[in-house]
Image (spheres, rainbow, N blue to C red):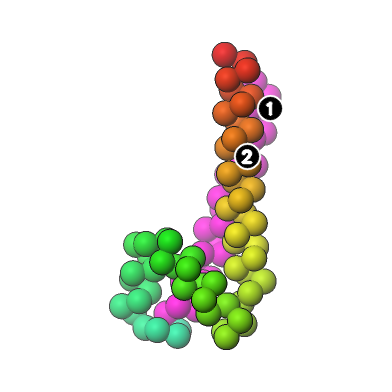
Amino acid sequence: MGILLVLQLINGLLGLVSFVLAIMVLIKLYNAEGAGQMLLGLFCGLYLFIWGWQNADRLGFAKEMRAWKLCLLAQLVVVALFLVVGMAGA
Protein backbone atom coordinates (compact mmCIF):
# COMPACT_ATOMS: atom_id res chain seq x y z
CA MET A 1 0.00 0.00 0.00
CA GLY A 2 2.94 2.32 0.65
CA ILE A 3 4.23 2.21 -2.93
CA LEU A 4 0.85 3.26 -4.29
CA LEU A 5 0.84 6.31 -2.03
CA VAL A 6 4.34 7.26 -3.15
CA LEU A 7 3.32 6.92 -6.79
CA GLN A 8 0.27 9.10 -6.19
CA LEU A 9 2.40 11.75 -4.51
CA ILE A 10 4.92 11.72 -7.36
CA ASN A 11 2.11 11.97 -9.89
CA GLY A 12 0.58 14.88 -7.99
CA LEU A 13 3.89 16.70 -7.82
CA LEU A 14 4.50 16.17 -11.55
CA GLY A 15 0.98 17.41 -12.23
CA LEU A 16 1.60 20.56 -10.20
CA VAL A 17 4.86 21.29 -12.04
CA SER A 18 3.12 20.63 -15.36
CA PHE A 19 0.34 23.03 -14.40
CA VAL A 20 2.81 25.79 -13.51
CA LEU A 21 4.65 25.30 -16.80
CA ALA A 22 1.37 25.41 -18.72
CA ILE A 23 0.49 28.71 -17.02
CA MET A 24 3.89 30.09 -18.03
CA VAL A 25 3.26 29.12 -21.66
CA LEU A 26 -0.25 30.55 -21.42
CA ILE A 27 1.21 33.89 -20.36
CA LYS A 28 3.61 33.79 -23.32
CA LEU A 29 0.66 33.02 -25.59
CA TYR A 30 -1.27 35.99 -24.23
CA ASN A 31 1.67 38.34 -24.71
CA ALA A 32 2.29 37.14 -28.27
CA GLU A 33 -1.24 36.56 -29.62
CA GLY A 34 -3.74 38.29 -27.34
CA ALA A 35 -6.73 37.33 -25.23
CA GLY A 36 -8.63 35.34 -27.86
CA GLN A 37 -5.81 32.88 -28.45
CA MET A 38 -5.12 32.75 -24.73
CA LEU A 39 -8.71 31.64 -24.07
CA LEU A 40 -8.34 28.95 -26.72
CA GLY A 41 -5.14 27.80 -25.02
CA LEU A 42 -6.87 27.88 -21.64
CA PHE A 43 -9.66 25.57 -22.77
CA CYS A 44 -7.61 23.39 -25.13
CA GLY A 45 -4.37 22.23 -23.58
CA LEU A 46 -3.31 20.42 -26.75
CA TYR A 47 -3.44 23.73 -28.66
CA LEU A 48 -1.37 25.36 -25.93
CA PHE A 49 1.21 22.56 -26.04
CA ILE A 50 1.50 22.64 -29.84
CA TRP A 51 1.64 26.44 -29.95
CA GLY A 52 4.34 26.37 -27.30
CA TRP A 53 6.52 24.01 -29.32
CA GLN A 54 5.99 25.98 -32.51
CA ASN A 55 7.07 29.24 -30.87
CA ALA A 56 9.54 28.06 -28.22
CA ASP A 57 12.69 29.08 -30.08
CA ARG A 58 11.27 32.34 -31.40
CA LEU A 59 10.07 33.52 -27.98
CA GLY A 60 12.88 31.93 -25.95
CA PHE A 61 11.16 29.38 -23.72
CA ALA A 62 12.45 26.08 -25.12
CA LYS A 63 13.65 25.00 -21.64
CA GLU A 64 10.14 25.35 -20.26
CA MET A 65 8.67 23.34 -23.13
CA ARG A 66 11.22 20.55 -22.65
CA ALA A 67 10.46 20.48 -18.92
CA TRP A 68 6.70 20.37 -19.62
CA LYS A 69 7.19 17.49 -22.08
CA LEU A 70 9.30 15.57 -19.57
CA CYS A 71 6.70 16.10 -16.84
CA LEU A 72 3.94 14.76 -19.07
CA LEU A 73 6.01 11.74 -20.09
CA ALA A 74 6.99 11.06 -16.48
CA GLN A 75 3.32 11.20 -15.49
CA LEU A 76 2.54 8.55 -18.11
CA VAL A 77 5.26 6.31 -16.67
CA VAL A 78 4.06 6.85 -13.10
CA VAL A 79 0.46 6.07 -14.04
CA ALA A 80 1.58 2.90 -15.83
CA LEU A 81 3.57 1.85 -12.75
CA PHE A 82 0.56 2.63 -10.57
CA LEU A 83 -1.59 0.35 -12.71
CA VAL A 84 0.98 -2.46 -12.70
CA VAL A 85 1.53 -2.28 -8.95
CA GLY A 86 -2.20 -1.98 -8.32
CA MET A 87 -2.99 -5.01 -10.47
CA ALA A 88 -0.26 -7.06 -8.83
CA GLY A 89 -1.63 -6.26 -5.39
CA ALA A 90 -5.24 -7.07 -6.31
Residue appearing at x 63%, y 41% in the figure? 77
Label 1: how many Cα within 10 Å (few below 14, some 14–19, many 20+): few
Amino acid type at image mark 1: Ile
Horizontal and vertical percent position of residue 82: 60, 31
Q: Is residue 75 left or right of residue 23?
A: right
Query: Mark 2, mark 1: which one is toward the viewer?
Result: 2
Amino acid type at image mark 2: Val
**Proximity of marks 2 and 1: CB atoms separated by less than 8 Å:** no
Residue appearing at x 47%, y 73% in the figure? 51
Horizontal and vertical percent position of residue 20: 55, 62
Farthest top residue in view = 90
Foreground of the two, 71 or 15: 71
Horizontal and vertical percent position of residue 69: 60, 59
Foreground of the two, 62 or 24: 62
Q: Is residue 8 visible?
A: no
Tell me the residue that label 2 is attached to: 78
Q: Is residue 43 left or right of residue 63?
A: left
Task: Indicate whether residue 26 is drawn in magenta.
Answer: yes
Residue appearing at x 68%, y 27% in the figure? 3
How many discs appear? 2
Determine the main secondary structure of the stretch shown in magenta: helix
Q: Which residues are magenta?
A: 1-30
Rendered image: mark on residue 50: none
Label 2: how many Cα within 10 Å (few below 14, some 14–19, many 20+): some
Tell me the residue that label 1 is attached to: 3
Place residue 30 in its image quadrant.
bottom left
